[in-house]
Amino acid sequence: MLVMGSTYVTYALGLLASIIVARALGPDDFGRYSYVVWLVGLLIMVGNNGLNATALRFISESLGRQSPETARAVHGWARRRQYACLVLIAVAFAALVPFVMPAGWEDRARVFVALTLAAAVPKALFMFDASVGKGYGRYGVEATSSVVMSVINMIAVLLLMQTGAGLIAYMALFAATSAGYALSSRLLLRAGDLGPTRAPLPPELLGRLRPHLFWTVILTTAYAFNNKSIETWLLNDLVGAAAVGYFAIAGALTRGGIEMLSAGLSTVLMPMMAHAFGEGRDQRAGRIMASAMRYYSFIGLLIGGVGVLVAAPAVSLLYGDAYTGVILPFQIMIGVTGLTLAESALHALLSTTDNQRIRVVFVLVSLGITAALAFALVPRYGLMGAVAAHTGSRLIVFIAIAGGISRMMDMRLPLRELGRLLAAAVVAAGVAAVPMAVVSEQWIGWVAGIVYAVVFAACSLAFGAWRGPDASLLLGFLAQYPRIHDRVAAPIRRWADRLPDEH
């Protein structure tokens, strides 16, 4: 809940800041700004490679084995390697600048390099510290840093807007905010006495850690180039800056909309599985995965359906008529992302049960599919070709990884419950389509979105998509709010009595 709350604040302020920057710069310059933001994200992922996930997993696992000294040693081992990786990535980026310049900005190579690295390096340090904090169970490291820096960034964006600042000023602010993230997270770790040590790792642990890191490096690097990277680079090179901006906005709205509800689950899922695996309870990790798939699917289908319906009025309201080209890409991307959101639970299971090799295979296959589709479709269809490449690859890989885990790991997927959730979404979409068909005004999308959400939630209950432990979990959460708990506890218990057990 701490992370969910901070995510709401961070996303709301980040979205508002992005809207202001987009309106201030216009489609072309905002496309260049978005391209730099994407490139910074790519450098962060490659620079941190698998160290974030490896540190989180083995710090949490060490604590599960009641060995905090080992957790600190893992922290130090990973951080020393992170510093070395960031140096190598900075040198490699400087050498590759001619191939990654933003469209229409070829005469400002030095400024581009300086601002990109000034944003990427400190933000990579923050991402590592945030992962370490999660491994220790200190979610406030990420939450507090994100909220504080989002507020500061929002104030600065408003000041730049008032002064009529241009692209360089907004990029410089982006770099300065990244430095603030790194400083905040490092101070919070020190305040919590979560410092690393240089103690040697036990040979048994090192024997498992190194293979995990090796496969995670491959996985993360492949994912970095698979996460809309090829499409973004091709759009910048072949289509133009404005198309990059449209694609970036559609992706940001999709990611933000999904994360608004899934952030808390995403944050605690991998540490929970690692802790259970550290206790020698891999079957419990499998049950956590099955429940998480149902929760992710409910969230994904809810947000995906609402997003499709409210896309037109939302984009027009937030970004203005200059960005209507975002609407259809956003509808496709959020719909497919919602449909495949349960993939997050599958990846978490593979990462925490020493099955990174399987996960790497799936991501490399996904990268190959995405590259093939992108190079075939973007030159011919531009922006919509990029959208088709991204969403097509995501659907194919989700089906493959779900089937692969079910067979290779002998894990039962909650297919019956997922099918019922999908049926609930289909019924809700049919009901929501009625007002859309009757009223042609753009604002009716808001009404249809509300209708969809209500009908979907009701149908998920009526179709039996939930289990007894879900009701117990809900009651445990509501116990933190006595007034609400006292009013709804009785009907929830009656509902729980009618639900089947998890098994």
Image (cartoon, helix red, strand yellow):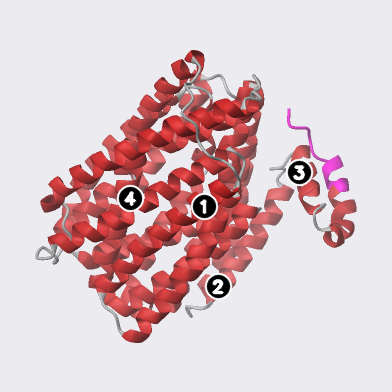
First in residue order: circle 1 vs circle 3: 1
Would residue 500 be counted in the magenta stretch? yes
Q: Position of residue 85 (x, y in %)?
A: 30, 37
The tag earlier along the polypeptide, 2 or 1, is: 1
Tell me the CA gap for discs 4 and 3.
40 Å
Q: Which mark is residue 473?
A: 3
Q: Which residue is mark 2?
A: 446
Residue visible at 79% across and 53% down? 478
| Residue 187 numbered tag | 1
Callout 4: few (<14), some (14-19), or many (20+) C-alpha neighbours within 10 Å?
many
Secondary structure beneath disc 4? helix
Name the N-terminal-most of marks 4 and 3: 4
Q: Which residues are magenta?
A: 493-503
> Percent from the top left, x then y, of residue 355?
47, 23
As shown in the figure, which amino acid type bears the numbered disc 1? Leu
Element assignment for label 3: helix
Camera-nearest label, 4 or 1: 1
Which badge, 3 or 2, is on the more N-terminal residue? 2
Q: Badges 2 and 1: C-beta atoms under 8 Å apart?
A: no
Which mark's residue is nearer the viewer, 3 or 2? 3
